Image (cartoon, rainbow, N blue to C red):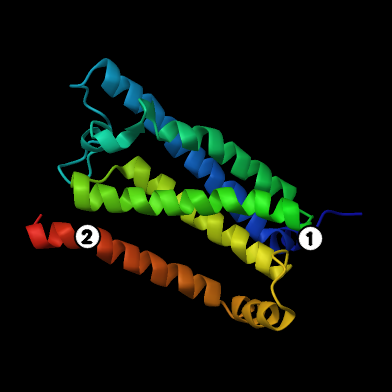
Amino acid sequence: MTFDFGSFLKKNFLAIIICFFAFTGFIAATTLTIEKFEVLRNPNAELACNINTVFNCGTVMKSPYAEVFGIPWSLLGVAGYPAAILTGLIYIDRRKTNRILTYLVTLPPLGAFVLSSYFMWITAYQIGAFCPWCILSAISSVNIFFALLALQIEENNLGLPEKIAQAIQAKLKQGWGVYFILALYSIFVMMEWYPFYIAGR
């Protein structure tokens, strides 16, 4: 029996997307943590992601929003993204899950999505600078959550009423999920760039 890679990829595409962006997010969070400790050791350190005044990791890391109770927020990503990788692996070749497991693996990515969106708002409207690694982490969180949500809806693991589940499933098959993500990113970009546009930066 030969292994059909195309069939495997098609069947597990969303789970693979989760694993890919969880790995990407882990790299971003780990790099952020290393650079955060470098800034703590040497406040004048020149970081590789200090591109200009707008894209400047140092400015973001030195702000009070970069940590909570003295602990860098990036450490949450270092711990959380491996859990997201495990979630993706769980759903490879196993699409149907019970209600408890469904919510256990879906709620943390929802929290990460909300938290990342909040931090991106903070960087634009409070700090006035973006951290490239933070952006990559935020993109990873968004894609992980919506890929997982689409996967749950496809199998109706969330227990939605059958007619509603079928209607959303039909839209997903028509590519509406991709359109939604593109529209969401467009809104994010406009909202994030607005204060810099007003300031003429």
In the picture, measured across the screen, residue 40 lies left or right of residue 68, that is left
In the picture, measured across the screen, residue 111 lies left or right of residue 119, that is right
Relative to residue 49, is residue 95 depicted above or below? below
In the picture, measured across the screen, residue 100 lies left or right of residue 124, that is right
The image position of residue 16, as x and y in percent, is: 64, 53
Relative to residue 44, is residue 172 depicted above or below? below
**Is the residue marked by circle 2 packed among few (<14), some (14-19), or many (20+) residues within 10 Å?**
few
Relative to residue 12, is residue 89 depicted above or below? above
Location of residue 148 (image quadrant) = bottom right
The image position of residue 152, as x and y in percent, is: 67, 63
Residue at far top of view: 41
Judged from the image, the secondary structure of the residue bearing numbered disc 1 is: loop
Judged from the image, the secondary structure of the residue bearing numbered disc 2 is: helix
* Quarter of the image that includes the N terminus: bottom right
The image position of residue 112, as x and y in percent, is: 48, 48
Location of residue 56 (image quadrant) = top left
Residue at far front of view: 69
User: Circle 1 is placed at which residue position?
Assistant: 96
- The answer to which of 44 and 163 lies nearer the viewer is 163
User: Circle 2 is placed at which residue position?
Assistant: 193
Disc 2 to disc 1, C-alpha distance: 40 Å
Identity of the amino acid at label 2?
Trp
Residue at far right of view: 1
- The answer to which of 121 and 170 lies nearer the viewer is 121
Residue drawn at 31 percent across, 21 percent down: 38
Q: Earlier in the sequence, mark 2 or mark 1?
A: 1
Identity of the amino acid at label 1?
Lys
Residue drawn at 29 percent across, 38 percent down: 65
